[in-house]
Image (tube, rainbow, N blue to C red):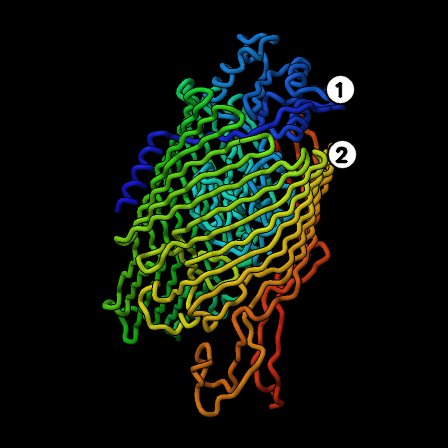
């Protein structure tokens, strides 16, 4: 009880303190810059050479002239002062933050006196929302391990299935990340499961992260400014998942002018707008994406149903998805910025058939309907207040509501005979299964930045969860007494608090350390979890860094599944009084080498131990139970390996090579006879090559090649007879009574699929249009050499052919995707 009181007191103190502001260290040094660049190109060079975070408005850099620069071993302050005159821009340096603004908009600041007013200018800028932040980091100088930052251009340059830019499939290229089943948006990070990944939209978590079983991700690439991906040494401000964190920053509206783009692809259309509602005070960003596959399927279905009408049949089918992003920001001047965020994503799938009698006087009418409808999606809204107190402190407070829901409805109706006459029957039933999560949360955090060497963050969050893991509604017209509503609802309350520090002790030693605490109350039971985090960077030389880290993570909800793709019918199940929180402990160490700003090499080794994992029991389908908890079993897992990566950036040519060496296994008392077994995605080797070449101002080429050891499946390789009855002590489940042979399974996930490899290529063609508008054609090939990668193996247990000849069991491989071309057009205005 004393621990609980101390924890709640810590939460209260942190809540009174407030929000977060991000800053990084940049060492003082001299640099050389040569060549002719516009303002954007100059800032890109500064970012690459210094690791600075750069904030600017795109409209301030638009149509900037190209300037000849020649700086030989000059300090950054000298370079910025001279470039300020040449580009007509004001550069304000505060710590590792570089703020860029047009000079004419700050009339009170003279061209020669930018340095003396830097403090006030920084305060003025922190009072407003930064429109765009360049997120590239200097990996060798950062204490965080396993971190990747990608902007919207990097996401769009990854060739994907059907040409749809995809956040998750861009992350699948990282070493240590398994993609799961081909073409689907699964992420299995360093031996973890798909549901162990935390996805945040401007700091707000969402749950199910795919459209159409994972063919598309729910994140519109046109709405994403940049993302930060962590797979080890997690900062203390994050929590709630075991394996990874993906923090997406959504685009904000432009405070100066209106602009937007429209994209039409093979599967969907996408439109976005950005601009001021009140110039320099209120901005709006809106993005809408919708699939249009039904526009093709409706005419095709009409033709099919016209041919089936004479036989009294009708096919019902259709699918579409929609996602919507909104961000409304209002500057409150000295009271900071108020932002309203909205997100909505939804899928609709329908399948079924109608059978009916043709009109005629000699026959009684007959109608049979069998329809299945499935809908699922996320909804998110949040209100955030950002208040810079001064140049040392910044405060954030946010309230948000998140909802995830899947709804499966099955309707069966049979009508025969004529109403009012003998023999008339009208029978119908409707079954509905729902799985839902409702989260209402409030959080606050504070950042204290006394110098470039010290950053302190602390914060707290309260979330009220309402889980409905398995709600069933049944209605029947033929059996009124059978109507029922079986709802299983779980209410939980969660408190989180963290304290995190980023400190440079010496020039050769920098570390990030902190503590994340969670308090979870469910069904009258309380769980307290404390998660220490630490990562350190040892500078062995100006070009070599040695890093090490440890992180504990906990998880209070899990999506349990026995499928190889993430389906909306898979239930999100919270922990209860019968199951403890999922936990993971990850140790990692690595070395980073950057002999030149154009090259970075890294090697990271890791070991991760996972406890209290939940899976279905081997015999759960045969159990006569009413509660979903009785179908589950708890166990542990482990994963270890190494990630190798080499990156190169030559300006027009950028690429990386990654290699992952991975082991992953599980141990459950009620699975595989209590013996340890490999996980489904125990992919031993993974090789990734990716490159983007801007060969001219109008043409850009990109390509990616992936090789991965195959997934694992459970397959019977032997059969045996049972003349004396069912040997239930060794048979995993009862066979059909008409079978003559039983399948023998040597173990769970005992067979590895053939190796997977694929080449994707694409080209972007830019065309300048009138009034500064741009048209972009994208043509890409998914699986360019048409490798048919197996996703499953089926065993045919047929015992004899048509003529009675005995046959041995046969195996067949199934693959989904051959070479798939795609084309899309984007119009920027």
Q: Residue at x 69, y 23 (%)?
A: 30
Which one is nearer the viewer's eye here, 215 or 245?
Answer: 245
Which one is nearer the viewer's eye here, 409 or 176?
Answer: 176
Q: Dot 2, how many residues are within 10 Å of its Cα: few (below 14), some (14-19), or many (20+)?
A: few
Q: Is residue 497 above or below residue 214?
A: above
Q: Is residue 745 above or below residue 267?
A: below
Left or right side of 94 for 515:
left
Residue 183 shows which numbered tag? none
Q: Residue at x 43, y 82 (%)?
A: 729
Q: Which quadrant of the structure image shows residue 591?
A: top right
Residue 162 appears in the figure: no
Q: Mark 2 or mark 1: which comes first in sequence? A: 1
Q: Residue at x 59, y 52 (%)?
A: 176
Find disc 1 in the rendering and name its residue: 70
Question: SS for tag 1?
Answer: strand
Mark 2 vs mark 1, CA separation in Å: 24 Å
**Nearer the camera: disc 2 or disc 1:** 1
Q: Is residue 140 above or below residue 185?
A: above
Query: Residue furthest toward the bottom?
Result: 723
Which one is nearer the viewer's eye here, 164 or 594?
Answer: 594
Q: Which quadrant of the structure image shows residue 409?
A: bottom left
Question: SS for tag 2?
Answer: loop
Residue 583 screen position, x and y as percent? 43, 53
Residue 41 screen position, x and y as percent? 68, 26
Residue 394 screen position, x and y as percent? 43, 26
- The mark tally for this picture is 2
Which image quadrant: the C terminus? top right
Residue 653 appears in the figure: yes
Residue 696 shows which numbered tag? 2
């Amino acid at each position: 009880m004393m621990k609980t009181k101390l924890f709640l007191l810590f939460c209260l103190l942190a809540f009174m303190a407030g929000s977060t502001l991000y800053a990084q260290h940049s060492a003082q040094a001299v640099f050389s810059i040569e060549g002719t660049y516009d303002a954007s190109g100059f800032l890109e060079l500064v970012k690459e050479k210094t690791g600075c975070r750069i904030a600017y408005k795109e409209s301030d850099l638009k149509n900037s002239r190209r300037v000849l620069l020649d700086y030989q071993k000059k300090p950054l302050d000298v370079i910025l002062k001279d470039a300020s005159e040449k580009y007509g821009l004001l550069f304000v340096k505060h710590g590792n933050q570089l703020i860029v603004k047009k000079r004419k908009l700050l009339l009170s600041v003279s061209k020669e006196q930018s340095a003396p007013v830097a403090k006030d200018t920084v305060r003025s800028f922190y009072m407003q929302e930064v429109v765009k932040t360049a997120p590239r980091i200097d990996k060798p100088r950062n204490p965080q391990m396993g971190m990747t930052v990608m902007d919207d251009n990097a996401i769009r340059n990854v060739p994907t299935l059907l040409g749809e830019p995809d956040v998750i499939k861009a992350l699948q290229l990282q070493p240590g990340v398994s993609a799961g089943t081909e073409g689907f948006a699964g992420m299995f990070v360093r031996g973890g499961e798909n549901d162990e990944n935390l996805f945040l939209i401007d700091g707000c978590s969402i749950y199910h992260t795919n459209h159409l079983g994972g063919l598309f991700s729910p994140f519109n690439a046109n709405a994403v400014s940049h993302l930060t991906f962590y797979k080890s040494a997690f900062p203390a401000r994050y929590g709630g998942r075991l394996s990874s964190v993906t923090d997406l920053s959504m685009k904000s509206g432009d405070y100066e002018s209106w602009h937007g783009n429209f994209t039409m692809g093979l599967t969907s259309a996408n439109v976005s707008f950005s601009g001021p509602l009140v110039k320099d005070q209120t901005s709006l960003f809106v993005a809408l994406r919708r699939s249009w596959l039904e526009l093709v399927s409706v005419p095709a279905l009409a033709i099919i149903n016209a041919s089936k009408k004479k036989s009294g049949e009708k096919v019902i089918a259709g699918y579409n998805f929609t996602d919507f992003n909104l961000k409304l920001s209002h500057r409150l001047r000295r009271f900071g910025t108020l932002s309203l965020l909205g997100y909505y994503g939804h899928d609709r799938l329908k399948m079924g058939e109608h059978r009916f009698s043709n009109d005629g006087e000699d026959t009684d009418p007959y109608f049979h309907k069998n329809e299945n409808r499935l809908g699922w999606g996320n909804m998110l809204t949040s209100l955030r207040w950002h208040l810079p107190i001064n140049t040392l402190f910044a405060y954030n407070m946010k309230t948000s509501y998140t909802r995830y829901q899947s709804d499966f409805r099955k309707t069966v109706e049979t009508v025969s005979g004529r109403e009012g006459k003998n023999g008339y029957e009208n029978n119908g039933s409707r079954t509905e299964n729902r799985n839902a999560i409702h989260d209402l949360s409030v959080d606050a955090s504070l950042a204290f930045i006394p110098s470039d060497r010290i950053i302190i963050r602390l914060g707290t969050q309260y979330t009220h969860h309402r889980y409905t893991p398995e709600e069933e509604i049944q209605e029947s017209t033929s059996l009124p007494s059978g109507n029922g509503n079986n709802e299983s609802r779980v209410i939980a309350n969660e408190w989180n608090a963290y304290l995190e520090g980023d400190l440079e002790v010496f020039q050769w030693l920098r570390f990030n350390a902190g503590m994340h605490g969670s308090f979870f109350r469910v069904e009258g039971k309380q769980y307290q979890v404390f998660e220490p985090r630490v990562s350190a960077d040892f500078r062995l030389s100006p070009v070599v860094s040695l890093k090490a880290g440890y992180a504990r993570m906990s998880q209070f909800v899990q999506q349990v599944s026995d499928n190889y793709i993430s389906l909306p019918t898979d239930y999100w199940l919270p922990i209860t009084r019968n199951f403890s929180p999922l936990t993971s402990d990850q140790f990692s160490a690595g070395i980073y080498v950057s002999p030149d700003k154009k090259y970075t090499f890294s090697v990271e080794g890791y070991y991760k131990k996972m406890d209290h994992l939940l899976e279905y029991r081997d015999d759960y389908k045969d159990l006569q139970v009413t509660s979903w908890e009785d179908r589950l079993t708890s166990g542990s897992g482990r994963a270890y390996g190494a990630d190798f990566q080499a990156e190169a950036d030559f300006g027009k040519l950028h690429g990386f090579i990654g290699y992952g060496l991975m082991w992953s296994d599980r141990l459950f008392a009620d699975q595989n006879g209590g013996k340890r077994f490999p996980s489904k995605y125990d992919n031993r080797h993974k090789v990734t090559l990716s490159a983007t070449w801007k060969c001219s101002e109008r043409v850009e080429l990109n390509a990616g090649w992936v090789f991965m050891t195959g997934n694992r499946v459970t397959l019977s390789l032997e059969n045996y007879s049972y003349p004396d009855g069912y040997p239930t002590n060794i048979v995993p489940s009862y066979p059909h009574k008409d079978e003559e042979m039983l399948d023998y399974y040597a173990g769970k996930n005992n067979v590895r699929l053939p190796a997977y490899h694929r080449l994707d290529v694409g080209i972007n063609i830019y065309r300048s249009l009138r009034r500064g508008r741009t048209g972009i054609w994208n043509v890409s090939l998914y699986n360019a050499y048409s490798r048919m990668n197996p996703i499953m193996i089926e065993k045919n247990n047929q015992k004899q052919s048509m003529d009675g000849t005995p046959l041995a069991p046969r195996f067949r491989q199934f693959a989904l995707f051959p070479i798939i071309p795609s084309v899309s057009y984007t119009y920027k205005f």
